[in-house]
Image (cartoon, rainbow, N blue to C red):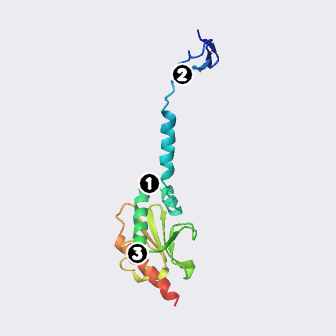
Amino acid sequence: MMVPTGRFVKSPNRGECPNSPGFRYCVLDKPARNRNADRDVKTQRRENATVPKRKTSEVDEYIAKCPKEARGGLVKIRAAIRAAAPGATERTDYFQMPGYSYPGFDYDGMFAWFSFKSPHIRLHVRPPVIQEHRKELAGYPTTKAIVSFPMGEPMPITLVKKLVKGSIRIMKDRSK
């Protein structure tokens, strides 16, 4: 006969406890033990340990903090900049927004940035680039160094690439 004592059941004879045979005390609210459960957990931990975790970059974090509607456009402009400037360093320490640089130039080598300011996704480039491409940018709001692309419209990838390449060219020309 088992006698309840709090959470445990005390058995006068060893071996009466269904959850842990060979012991006098049983846990009342514990289900029967699956002997393979520990092995499955250890195997799962071992499998997870071999998969290297991808480091999230500060740029990924910046995009994740933006509204869901803007993320697609930000990812597209990021890909366009990367395609136009292969080998550029991606960083957020200059102006606290995603930017791209080549070491050894003025402005710490920075030539392009992107940002989100509702309701626009913005491309920041060196100021002369905006003046050089004034006709192509006629349909977009601009400042001296920023082009704003409306979120609801398709991202003009070829124009973004052209502006980024122009910014790189101006940066390199100034260093001569």
Q: Residue at x 35, y 73 (%)?
A: 158
Would you call the spot at circle 1 few (<14 residues within 10 Å), some (14-19), or many (20 or more)? few
Looking at the picture, which amino acid does disc 2 mark?
Answer: Asn
Indicate whether 102 appears above or below 49. below
Q: Nearer the viewer, residue 66 or 132?
A: 66
Q: Is residue 137 visible?
A: no
Q: CA distance from mark 3 to mark 1?
A: 25 Å
Q: Which residue is mark 1?
A: 68
SS type, badge 3: helix
Q: Nearer the viewer, residue 84 or 135?
A: 84
Looking at the picture, which amino acid does disc 1 mark?
Answer: Lys
Q: CA distance from mark 2 to mark 1?
A: 50 Å
Q: Is residue 72 visible?
A: yes
Numbered label attached to residue 84: 3
Q: Residue at x 51, y 59 (%)?
A: 56
Looking at the picture, which amino acid does disc 3 mark?
Answer: Ala
Q: Position of residue 122 (x, y in %)?
A: 45, 68
Q: Nearer the viewer, residue 124 or 78?
A: 78
SS type, badge 2: loop
The quarter of the picture where the N terminus appears is: top right
Residue farthest to the top, as pictured: 1
Q: Which residue is mark 2?
A: 19
Give the mark, 3 or 2, whose residue is nearer the N terminus. Answer: 2
